[in-house]
Image (cartoon, rainbow, N blue to C red):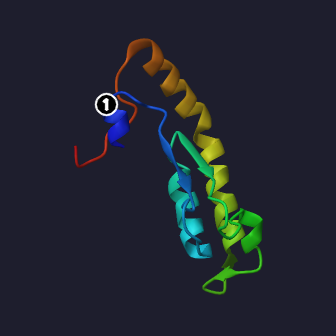
Amino acid sequence: MTSNIVGIPMAGSDICGFNDDTTPELCARWHMLGAFYPFSRNHNAWNTVRQEPYIFANETYEGSITYTDIMRKAMRNKYCLIRYMYTELSFLSKEGGVFFKPLFF
């Protein structure tokens, strides 16, 4: 978020983490958060476990929904917001300004 404050609006993160192995719950939570970043990708380092959403298809969250379904819903949310984000980023490239401000600023 601080990158946006100093004028870099297209910032994001490697969701599910990068350096170490991840868990299904951590990866699902990263996907839910990453849906609201202008840029996010599921990306990790060599010699770590695979973390694509379909890897967690057989694991369930509290016995009710699979982690893959949670990640799928997060991706759909991102796709619903993408027109808004790209329009706002286009305005920012022409007029300047801040894409989003965290509450603590």
Q: Residue at x 57, y 74 (%)?
A: 25
The front one of 52 and 68 is: 52
Quadrant of the rendering where the N terminus is positioned: top left
Q: What x and y, as percent, mark residue 44?
A: 62, 58
Q: What x and y, as percent, mark residue 55?
A: 75, 70
Residue furthest front as drawn = 47
Residue furthest left as drawn = 105
Quadrant of the rendering where the C terminus is positioned: top left
**Vertical placement of 59 versus 22: above or below?**
below
Q: Residue at x 59, y 67 (%)?
A: 28
**Vertical placement of 35 versus 16: above or below?**
above
| The image quarter in which residue 57 lies | bottom right
Residue under numbered circle 1: 6
Disc 1 element: loop
Q: What x and y, as percent, mark residue 91?
A: 47, 19
Q: Residue at x 31, y 34 (%)?
A: 5
Q: What x and y, as percent, mark residue 68?
A: 71, 68
Question: How many circles with numbers are drawn on the protein?
Answer: 1
**Vertical placement of 43 versus 22: above or below?**
above
